[in-house]
Amino acid sequence: MMMTTSDLATALVQSLKDKKCGDDDSDCPHGASPFDFKPAAPPASLTQLCQAVAEHLEYGGQVYGLASHCQALSVHPEVSQAFWRLSQLVKSPGVMWLLLADWIDRRSPPPQTKLDEQRVSDVLQPHLQCLDPALIDDAGRLFDRLLGAYGNEGWTPARLQRLLRSIRSR
């Protein structure tokens, strides 16, 4: 007998039901069932991305470790697109994160890091000195083009935010 896709799906659902936590759900944390799921986390803002990079470097982390440090962050698709384009110029993911944090800091400095009174630019500067200034400029132009429409605190395009404010003020 050949198994169809719907038969396979039914078997999968049944196996999940069979693995259900105890009858009274006492074995499940907070009464959760195997079908409970958490919604996807919203993408981190540009400020949050910049602060994650600065905090990593501030505590002695190295540039090559930035990608793994920032891996847990939910990244907006536009940032992923910018990194893909930047990969044509830079092969190191850590350097890409450093360039992004520098661009965010230069366009609108985020608040000082929570952990120390040191400014983000002071933390980034020693690492940026190792890079070609032309590369920093090229990356900045790329980020301006792909991410420049967004504010540092959210993913609503800045132009749309201004339009909504003007409509509400009427």
Image (cartoon, rainbow, N blue to C red):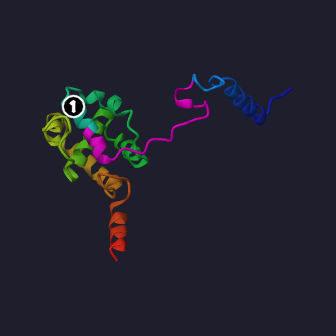
Decide if residue 132 is on the left or right side of residue 74. Answer: left
- What residue did someone put label 1 on? 57
Residue 161 shows in the view? yes
Any magenta on residue 33? yes
Residue extent of the magenta highlight: 28-51
Counting from the top left corner in percent of width and height, residue 141 is at 27, 52
Q: Up-down: is 41 above or below 146?
A: above
Q: Amino acid at mark 1?
A: Leu
Residue 92 shows in the view? no
Q: Image quadrant for the C terminus?
A: bottom left
Q: Up-down: is 165 above or below 110?
A: below
Res. 98 image quadrant: top left
Q: Image quadrant for the N terminus?
A: top right
Decide if residue 25 is on the left or right side of residue 145. Answer: right
Query: Quick one: label 1, few (<14), some, or many (20+) residues within 10 Å?
Result: some
- Magenta span dominant secondary structure: loop
Q: Please give the name of the residue rendered at 57% of the width and 22% of the height, measured from the top-left corner.
A: 27
Res. 158 image quadrant: bottom left
Counting from the top left corner in percent of width and height, residue 162 is at 32, 67
Q: Nearer the viewer, residue 144 or 85?
A: 144
